[in-house]
Image (tube, rainbow, N blue to C red):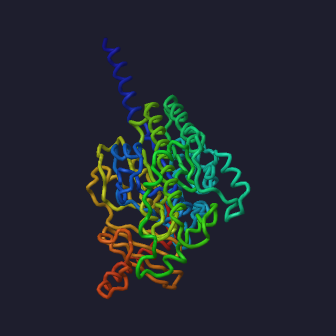
């Protein structure tokens, strides 16, 4: 009897030990061009139909003040994946390759692979699918940005004039096809099958799922277009340059070039007419709702595989998006619409289910994931772990963030957004907005005499950050 008891006790202890040593999984959901327009954010009263992202927000911590460190996809993704801030000479445009600008970095897929994880990449994670590709244990062919299903769209593209990156594309399509006709649907099914494999083999995973929707062109099955009444789509009211703002904020920093140079029927300059604007906004909304449905299916697949209780879900977008504000479309700016981004973390390790007003930067994701999984991050990391906020969402971990694009560098807090335009040693202008009373940034108050000391205060902040980000972060790297 004593011998049987010892055997049972031994089996129990081994089982407990295996449970303790079981690695925690990460589901890393990337969304392209998503401003925080989900219902859970109540963003400027926009009524998006996003039940699955809303549900995810209710099951974890939603960061209300999350910001990209640079509002362009290639650079932003390189920053997130390496934990390094962009600078004037590093991570500064869409063509950025993390492995070129930061060859000494240890990207997320590398650090997880080296710590015994399966690292999976489906869809768009890095801007270039071959960037640090050797550190994925499995990856697909990456983004399918113009994955047209309507024969008429394909005909229009094939007969179109050449744009900046090839044939110009139609801006929207909504054929009567099923959810899995587009690549975003296909990668969802692929991920669900992979969850089943992990459920059977018990391997830990860092799975990165990169949805292209709602990036242009706005393409989705018809049922998502039909969710919205076209005539009731609200258009931006402030389609003008902010009063008193420097021309560089409009001309040099942003001219909606991505839309104008690559899509059919878009004028080369000037404001878009109401019909075109409404088509674009409607298409954006429909594309967001389609992507939301795919996220719902993805999380359902995780749950059905029995993996949700040991998996943290992190949902983020590489930057925000303009829908006509100040006459802008797309991103590429330091204005609020371009730099504010959704961020939701739902982790079984923490019971908090709340919103957080702590200011957060996307560069904070790297150290957060490492702490959640017990991995020691490299010593060059320039973000800050968000786990204290996951423990207590009322904590204000940061009260300001830093972001940039091209010549523009900005510091943003709850009261003000301040941008300076600098090229090398040359100062090109500035702008200041009162975020308590002018959230839409319609009046630049930087030139008002009573704000002289305020401008000086924020200028000093930017100078300190500029000095910091221009240093080589890998100089003293020991990992």
Q: How many marks?
A: 0
- Which residue is at the front of the view, 154 or 52? 154
Residue 316 place in picture, x, y as percent: 45, 53
The quadrant of the image that shows the N terminus is top left
- Which residue is at the front of the view, 235 or 158? 235
In the displayed structure image, the side of residue 268 where residue 70 appears, left or right: left
Q: Is residue 176 above or below residue 369?
A: above
Residue 296 place in picture, x, y as percent: 45, 40
Q: Is residue 199 above or below residue 218?
A: above
Name, please, the residue furthest toward the front.
Answer: 231
Q: Residue at x 34, y 43 (%)?
A: 59
Name, please, the residue furthest toward the bottom.
Answer: 449
Name, please, the residue furthest toward the right.
Answer: 159
Q: Is residue 102 visible?
A: yes
Q: Is residue 363 above or below residue 149?
A: below
- Which residue is at the front of the view, 111 or 32? 32
In the displayed structure image, the side of residue 170 where residue 44 appears, left or right: left
- Which residue is at the front of the view, 11 or 264? 264
Q: Residue at x 55, y 51 (%)?
A: 212
Residue 393 place in picture, x, y as percent: 28, 53
Q: Is residue 475 visible?
A: no
Give the quarter of the image for residue 97: bottom right
In the displayed structure image, the side of residue 29 where residue 346 appears, left or right: left
In the displayed structure image, the side of residue 28 where residue 154 appears, left or right: right
Residue 258 place in picture, x, y as percent: 59, 65
């Amino acid at each position: 009897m004593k011998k049987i008891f010892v055997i049972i006790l031994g089996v129990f202890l081994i089982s407990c030990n295996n449970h303790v040593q079981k690695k925690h999984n990460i589901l890393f959901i990337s969304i392209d061009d998503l401003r925080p327009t989900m219902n859970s954010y109540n963003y400027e009263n926009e009524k998006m139909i996003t039940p699955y992202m809303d549900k995810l927000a209710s099951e974890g911590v939603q960061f209300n003040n999350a910001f990209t460190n640079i509002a362009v996809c290639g650079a932003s993704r390189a920053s997130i994946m390496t934990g390094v801030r962009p600078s004037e000479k590093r991570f500064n445009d869409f063509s950025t390759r993390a492995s070129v600008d930061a060859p000494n970095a240890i990207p997320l897929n590398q650090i997880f692979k080296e710590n015994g994880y399966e690292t999976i990449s489906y869809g768009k994670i890095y801007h270039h699918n071959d960037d640090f590709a050797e550190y994925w244990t499995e990856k697909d062919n990456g983004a399918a940005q113009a994955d047209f299903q309507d024969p008429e769209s394909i005909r229009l593209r094939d007969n179109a004039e050449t744009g900046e990156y090839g044939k110009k594309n139609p801006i929207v399509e909504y054929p009567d096809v099923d959810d899995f006709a587009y690549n975003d649907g296909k990668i969802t099914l692929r991920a669900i099958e992979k969850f089943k494999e992990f459920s059977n083999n018990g391997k830990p995973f860092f799975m990165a799922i990169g949805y292209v929707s709602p990036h242009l062109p706005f393409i989705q099955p018809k049922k998502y277009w039909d969710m919205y009444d076209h005539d009731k789509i609200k258009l931006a009211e402030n389609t003008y340059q902010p009063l008193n703002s420097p021309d560089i904020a409009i001309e040099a920093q942003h001219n909606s070039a991505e839309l104008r140079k690559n899509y059919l029927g878009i004028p080369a300059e000037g404001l878009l007419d109401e019909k075109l604007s409404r088509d674009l906004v409607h298409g954006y909304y429909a594309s967001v709702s389609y992507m939301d449905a795919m996220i719902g299916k993805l999380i359902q697949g995780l749950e059905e595989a029995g993996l949700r209780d040991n998996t943290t879900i992190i949902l983020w977008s590489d930057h925000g998006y303009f829908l006509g504000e100040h006459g802008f479309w797309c991103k590429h700016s330091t204005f609020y619409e371009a730099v504010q981004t959704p961020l939701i973390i739902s982790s079984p390790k923490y019971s908090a289910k709340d919103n957080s007003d702590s200011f957060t930067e996307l560069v904070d994701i790297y150290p957060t994931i490492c702490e959640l999984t017990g991995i020691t991050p490299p010593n060059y990391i320039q973000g800050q772990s968000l786990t204290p906020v996951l423990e207590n969402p009322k904590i204000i971990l940061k009260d300001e963030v830093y972001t940039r694009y091209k010549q523009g560098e900005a510091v943003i807090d709850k009261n003000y957004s301040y941008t300076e335009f600098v090229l090398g040693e040359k100062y090109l202008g500035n702008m200041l907005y009162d975020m308590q009373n002018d959230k839409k940034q319609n009046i630049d108050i930087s030139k008002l005499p009573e704000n002289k000391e305020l401008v000086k205060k924020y200028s000093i902040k930017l100078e300190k950050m500029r000095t910091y980000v221009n240093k080589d972060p890998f100089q003293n790297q020991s990992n």
